[in-house]
Amino acid sequence: MEERTGAQLIAEALRAQNVEYMFGIVGVPVIEVAMAAQTAGIKYVGMRNEQAACYAASAIGYLTGRPAVCLVVSGPGLIHALGGMANANMNCWPVLVIGGSSDQNQETTGAFQEFPQAVRSSMYGRPGACYVDIPGDMVNAKIEEVKVRTVSCCPPPPVGLAQYNAIAGAISVLKQAERPLIIIGKGAAYSRAEAEILQLVESCELPFLPTPMGKGVVPDDHPNCVAAARSRALLQADVVVLLGARLNWILHFGFPPRFSPQVKIIQVDLCAEELGNNMRPAAALLGDIRAVVSQAMALQPALPMNYYTAFHHISQLLPKDCIIVSEGANTMDIGRTMLLNSLPRHRLDAGTFGTMGVGLGFAIAAALLEKTQGSGQRVVCVEGDSAFGFSGMEVETMCRYKLPVVIIVINNNGIYSGVDTDTWREMEKMGDLTNIAPPVTLLPDARYDEVMRAFGGKGYLVQTPEELRSALQESLADWDRPSLLNVLIDPASDRKQQEFPWLTRSNL
Ligand code: ADP
Ligand code: MG
């Protein structure tokens, strides 16, 4: 029967845990452990002080999500490593410190089986430092292979979701915010939540501030980054969403005069003990940041949609080279910032004269050119409902010539803004609409999509982000006829206030 040394078992157990790096300084009794680790395929980096070795190992843990090993001798080696362990613990970074101590009675070989536990507790819950003590005599002791208990790789930590009610509460606090601010910490970086947080920032137009190590989760040069006005942003925010950052000295404990005394905090953290530290949060979301942000995003598009939600989805699906025709008031204004062009002469809008009703004619011209030149570029016409009305009958022209224009009517029941169906019905009961109806209103929920259908084009009634995405994808795939997406948005949806555009948001 083949025999294995304790050192080999340690190395193989580490390898089975997907440990890739070992940093350390060897001495009796851990030299063989380092050698066995190399044989097992682990990269061993000899350092000059255990403290630096532990810093390095913990940084691997932060950057990869799986712990690396810091290998030390007993006594002074471990004492030196303590600085690194404390640092890893305070940073919430996983690291596995293995120390060799003096020999002990051979009988308690069970200590090897502590390995997977150590890996698990370094990664699960709040990540941190873990220490495994290897009695020196075990390093070179041999054991028959048949007696070796192999332990499989510890799976990634389970992902916690926040309570539904807590998320709904957080969204309502955020919706009432006038000057919201997201603070992105290194917990957000560790949870790899970059895609989700970017989507949150962009779809809700939220300003954000990274902590020193939260930098880059959303790029520093993103237009919503308020790092250049950090003090002002902290002080003026009325609602702060804390994503994996603690209200410790780095964030002035969340206290005045750096924060407003009235500030409401929405706190997201996977460590329950952290929730409520230094302040009472308006909403405490216990869970993994990436998962919780996705949860919130799924709940967030409260219906009906607003301009920002609709344009967010449209902008994600439009081909980069499409020709965008746009007219309307808010539709054109907000569309200008959210629907982007990357080619010249691909934007046609109300122009110098601010004319409404130009869009469909422009779109027909662009589609005819595309047809003769066969450039393969889509013509997408984004219209306010009022603007569409000025020349809506041109959809018949598009159908007659089979011009595959995609018309998106952002329908808010009026010019600038309208009223909802219930309010309209109430007004109808109150008397003569010519006396009562606000001049800006148009018929609520008008079926412009049916107008397109009347001539053989495709018409879609769109009320949710999902319907918007699927209708737009279908329309963009159809080159045989025009389509019209009648996107019903909140009639009260408005553009954001203008004074401090990067700090002000009235629509979520
Ligand atoms: P910063 O220095 O960037 O302010 P901190 O170290 O103060 O960041 O805070 C990080 C917080 O992130 C810690 O409270 C930690 O519990 C938390 N955290 C770490 N990983 C996750 C995760 N995956 N999901 C949620 N919270 C996390
Ligand atoms: Mg912090």
Image (tube, grey):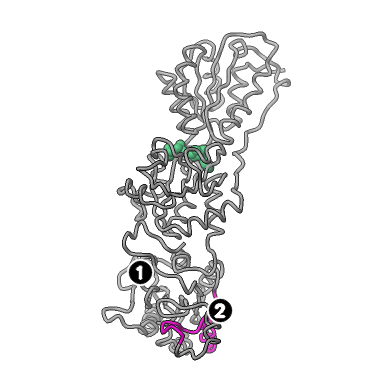
Instruction: Judge by depth and name the residue closer to the eye, 427 or 239.
Output: 427
Query: If you read the primary sequence from the N terminus, does the residue marked by circle 2 or circle 1 appear first?
Result: 1
Q: Which residue is drawn at 35% across and 84% down?
A: 358
- Asked where in the image residue 180 lies, by quadrant, the reply is bottom left
Element under label 1?
helix
Q: Which residue is drawn at 33% across and 73% down?
A: 347
Labels 2 & 1 near each other (Cβ < 8 A) = no
Total residue callouts: 2
Tell me: 155 left or right of 238: right
> Quick one: label 1, few (<14), some, or many (20+) residues within 10 Å?
some
Q: Position of residue 495 (x, y in %)?
A: 39, 68
Task: Respond yes or no on whether mark 1 lies under 8 Å from ligand 1.
Answer: no
Q: What residue type is labelled 1?
A: Arg
Q: What residue type is labelled 2?
A: Asp
Placement of 234 over or under 60, stated as above or below: below
Placement of 370 over or under 187, stated as above or below: below
Instruction: Judge by depth and name the residue closer to the eye, 39 or 269.
Output: 269
Residue beneath disc 1:
336
Q: Where is residue 390 in the image (x, y as percent from the top left)?
A: 40, 87
- Asked where in the image residue 139 lies, by quadrant, the reply is top right
Residue beneath disc 2:
422
CA gap, disc 2 and disc 1: 32 Å
**Magenta-colored span:** 436-462
Q: Does the magenta stretch include residue 300?
A: no
Q: Position of residue 160 (x, y in %)?
A: 60, 44
Instruction: Judge by depth and name the residue closer to the eye, 472 or 321.
Output: 472
Q: Position of residue 164 (x, y in %)?
A: 61, 53
Whether residue 229 is visible, yes or no, is: yes
Whether residue 406 is visible, yes or no, is: no
> Quick one: label 2, few (<14), some, or many (20+) residues within 10 Å?
few
Quadrant for the N terminus in the image: top right
Element under label 2?
helix
